[in-house]
Image: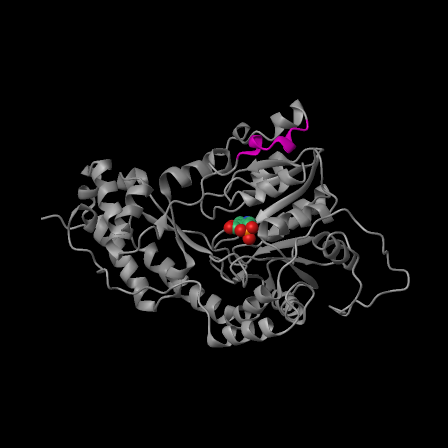
């Protein structure tokens, strides 16, 4: 009799098993949305938007902050505010959502795809240093999933080479490094509030910056080029007599008052949710440490609070003689969670959604066309993680109870105890069983 659910055995969790859901909302959110609907402020610069902006920037420890349409636009506006444009090189991790590099392409810069560390999937700083040239203007660090690179060393690299540091914080509202919030280490940070994120309004974005001048630029860039009018006065920034009121070329990258309403409600719950996930992640990491052939990700000692978009770990495909895809299919079937466990992001040099050459407007000439070719970058660590050893699951798994972390470990052990069943399963049979679960 087969033991593993993927090969026809009894699953650890039945179809009726309930797992934590995401996104979540409360009655108070619905009341606020109704209040906004009854008001005559639906668009930008409304009271709810600025209340959220001031509170969220303060939570991360940022000086100034403002909402924008989404996290892709947030990166684009950060680049534009810093004056980065045609032919400038920007160092970007190869393992990230395509938006990080796509935003560079959208300002006609050249994303230099750079490999990641095997045990954090965040920027490998030796690879970063090797990729710096006389044309490098900025580094975009992505605080990916639930890990961080060495932020202190990264700041030093930027200082030494006079480079801007942009933080893509889409995954980590609520993360702190030596007690200081992520998003406050670089010149500008960008955030995403898309539905799957830990703070969400369905869609939405944010920028945090340190200087008044950058705030004014970001304000103007998100608002069709209009200068900041100090109406309302936000972050105490009154209109100075000598304030530059010239306009910039830009578009509409604003957020609605309803979205801000959802964010304000979500922000009230954010810190408690981040702490709940972090406690479960620490426990799960500890449990994983004791399983042969399985490796938790590295958590640097400087991390004082870790927020998780995804929880990652690695299997040893050499030792276990299975791939991460086989392992994920077995986990999802055992726990009755379709598509929950999956390999980490496809590296951008192999990513189906990162195709800069399909946009005519990018064709600045042969040289640029060649430079933005993602396949020219060799990034073996990210490739190995995606193709063989990496396993990632959405943060909602960490929203469950402590004992559920033990159940997850139990599923891993069951798979490893019966690994021959998985090794000998034909790929077609594996896919068929897995599809039956997703229906
Ligand atoms: C790392 C990273 N950066 C940027 C973005 C883009 O954010 P948005 O979807 O809000 O445009 C995402 C979204 O998934 C992301 O994961």
- Looking at the image, the residue that sits furthest to the right is 241
- Looking at the image, the residue that sits furthest to the top is 366
Q: Quadrant of residue 17?
A: bottom left
Apparent side of residue 2 relative to residue 435 in the rendered image (left or right): left
Apparent side of residue 339 relative to residue 270 in the rendered image (left or right): left
Any magenta on residue 135? no
Q: Position of residue 422 (x, y in %)?
A: 21, 42
In the picture shown, does residue 329 fall above or below 129? below
Residue at image x 45%, y 40%? 346
Total marks drawn?
0
In the picture shown, does residue 207 fall above or below 75? below
Q: Position of residue 79 (x, y in %)?
A: 68, 46
Any magenta on residue 359? yes
Residue at image x 71%, y 46%? 80
Q: Please give the range of residues in magenta.
A: 355-364
In the picture shown, does residue 141 fall above or below 68? above
Can residue 143 be seen in this snapshot?
A: no
Kindly report the secondary structure that dominates the magenta region of the rendered protein.
helix
Q: Position of residue 235 (x, y in %)?
A: 73, 68
Q: How is the image coloured?
A: one colour
Of residue 54 and residue 30, the one placed in the foreground of this image is 30
Of residue 112 and residue 170, the one placed in the foreground of this image is 170
Q: Quadrant of residue 70?
A: bottom right
Apparent side of residue 181 relative to residue 122 in the rendered image (left or right): right
Residue at image x 42%, y 62%? 22
Can residue 40 be seen in this snapshot?
A: yes
């Amino acid at each position: 009799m087969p033991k593993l659910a993927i090969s026809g055995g009894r699953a650890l969790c039945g179809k009726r098993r309930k797992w934590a859901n995401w996104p979540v909302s409360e009655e108070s959110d619905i009341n606020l949305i109704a209040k906004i609907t009854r008001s005559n402020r639906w668009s930008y610069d409304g009271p709810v938007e600025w209340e959220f902006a001031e509170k969220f920037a303060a939570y991360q420890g940022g000086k100034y902050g403002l909402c924008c349409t989404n996290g892709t636009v947030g990166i684009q506006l950060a680049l534009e505010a810093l004056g980065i444009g045609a032919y400038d090189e920007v160092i970007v991790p190869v393992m990230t959502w395509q938006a990080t590099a796509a935003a560079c392409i959208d300002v006609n810069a050249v994303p230099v795809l750079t490999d990641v560390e095997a045990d954090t999937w965040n920027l490998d700083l030796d690879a970063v240093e090797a990729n710096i040239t006389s044309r490098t203007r900025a580094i975009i660090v992505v605080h990916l999933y639930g890990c961080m690179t060495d932020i202190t060393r990264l700041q030093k690299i930027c200082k030494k080479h006079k480079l801007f540091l942009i933080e893509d914080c889409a995954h980590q509202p609520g993360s702190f490094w030596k007690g200081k919030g992520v998003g406050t280490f670089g010149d500008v940070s960008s955030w995403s509030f898309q539905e799957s994120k830990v703070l969400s309004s369905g869609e939405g974005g944010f920028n945090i910056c340190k200087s008044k001048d950058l705030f004014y630029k970001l304000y103007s860039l998100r608002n069709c080029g209009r200068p900041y009018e100090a109406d309302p006065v936000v972050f105490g920034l009154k209109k100075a007599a000598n304030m530059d009121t010239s306009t910039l070329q830009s578009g509409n990258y604003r957020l609605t008052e309803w979205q801000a309403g959802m964010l304000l409600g979500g922000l009230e719950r954010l810190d408690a949710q981040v702490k709940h996930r972090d406690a479960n992640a620490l426990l799960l990491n500890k449990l994983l440490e004791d399983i042969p052939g399985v490796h938790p990700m590295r958590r640097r000692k400087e991390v004082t609070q870790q927020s998780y978009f995804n929880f990652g770990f690695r299997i040893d495909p050499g030792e276990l003689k299975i791939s991460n895809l086989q392992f994920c299919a077995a986990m999802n079937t055992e726990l009755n969670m379709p598509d929950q466990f999956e390999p980490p992001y496809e590296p951008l040099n192999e990513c189906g959604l990162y195709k800069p050459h399909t946009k005519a407007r990018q064709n600045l000439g042969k040289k640029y066309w060649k430079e933005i070719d993602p396949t020219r970058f060799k990034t073996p660590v990210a490739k190995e993680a995606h193709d063989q050893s990496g396993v990632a699951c959405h943060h909602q798994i960490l929203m469950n109870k402590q004992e559920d972390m033990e159940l997850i470990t139990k599923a891993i052990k069951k798979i490893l105890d019966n690994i021959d069943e998985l090794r000998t399963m034909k790929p077609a049979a594996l896919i068929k069983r897995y599809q039956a679960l997703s229906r």
